[in-house]
């Protein structure tokens, strides 16, 4: 799981030179020859979808801030791109500012406090993960202010915030599911089976009306079904 775009290049080269197959997940390695299978999500498309949900709730107009992830990371760049791509389709949505919350709740709360001090009106918050979204909610509550907040990950704490009405929406980025698929791809490959070059989990926006499937602790969530995922990949290729 590379976090930085190039920092693991030397290590990857040594693993490949030793003849060991690499199964890559979450953040894609730079060179496709470096891995057998990549498992992840379309981060930019996912954050564009959750941003669309916020903008629709704002009826296409309003002042919005962004809490982005750790500077320089692959995921942060892709999720930021999705937010900005979505905003381009809403000319009356104004992006007031963007502050890094490092994907952490306490730093996200501090970043939100900074934005609240700078902007007397904030209608919506785009947070690149649920931890920062939860931090933003805490900052808003302490300041006695209200904004619509969306995040990414659908972690159990975020599901509770959906149910209480504190969080408008999140997206299902399930590292548990992704890691399970990567592990199964590796096991199947070592048994001599063919495996796809890329497995992308479906994009699902989670909100109060459909959150029941995610309303359970991580250890109680179901493992993904390999055959079902392969059928989704096949359908996607046929429709391309």
Image: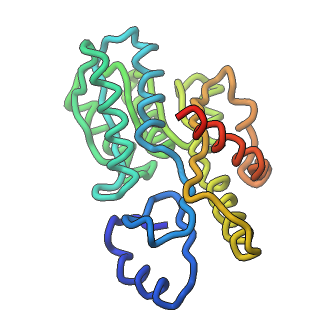
Residue in the picture at 79% in, 48% down: 222
Query: Residue 184: x percent and y percent?
Result: 72, 64
How many callouts does the rendering have?
0
Residue placed most toward the observer, 101 or 231: 231
Residue in the picture at 49% in, 46% down: 131
Residue in the picture at 22% in, 26% down: 119
> Residue pushed farthest bottom?
18
Q: Is residue 31 left or right of residue 162?
A: left
Quadrant of res 231: top right
Residue placed most toward the observer, 189 or 55: 189
Coloring basis for residues = rainbow
Query: Residue 52: x percent and y percent?
Result: 43, 22
Query: Residue 69: x percent and y percent?
Result: 36, 50
Q: Is residue 224 left or right of residue 74?
A: right
Residue 44 vertical position relative to residue 52 in the rendered view, above or below: below
Residue in the picture at 37% in, 23% down: 124
Q: Is residue 22 left or right of residue 67?
A: right
> Residue pushed farthest top?
59
Quadrant of res 56: top left
Residue 113 vertical position relative to residue 60 in the rendered view, above or below: below
């Amino acid at each position: 799981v590379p976090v930085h775009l190039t920092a693991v290049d030397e290590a990857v080269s040594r693993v490949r030179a030793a003849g060991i197959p690499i199964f890559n997940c979450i953040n894609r390695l730079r060179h496709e020859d470096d891995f057998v299978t990549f498992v992840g999500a379309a981060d930019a498309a996912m954050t564009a979808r959750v941003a669309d949900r916020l903008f629709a709730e704002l009826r296409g107009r309003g002042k919005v801030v962004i809490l982005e992830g750790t500077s320089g990371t692959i995921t942060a760049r892709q999720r930021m791109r999705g937010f900005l791509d979505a905003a381009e389709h809403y000319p009356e949505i104004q992006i007031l500012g963007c502050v890094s919350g490092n994907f952490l709740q306490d730093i996200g709360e501090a970043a939100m406090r900074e934005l609240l001090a700078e902007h007397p009106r904030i209608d919506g918050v785009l947070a690149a993960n649920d931890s920062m979204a939860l931090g933003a909610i805490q900052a808003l509550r302490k300041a006695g202010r209200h904004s619509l907040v969306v995040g990414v990950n659908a972690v159990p704490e975020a599901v509770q915030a959906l149910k209480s009405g504190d969080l408008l929406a999140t997206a299902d980025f399930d590292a548990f599911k992704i890691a399970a698929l990567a592990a199964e791809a590796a096991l199947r490959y070592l048994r001599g089976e063919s495996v796809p070059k890329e497995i992308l989990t479906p994009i699902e926006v989670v909100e109060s009306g459909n959150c029941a499937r995610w309303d359970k602790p991580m250890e109680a969530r179901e493992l993904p079904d390999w055959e079902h995922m392969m059928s989704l990949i096949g359908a996607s290729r046929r429709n391309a």
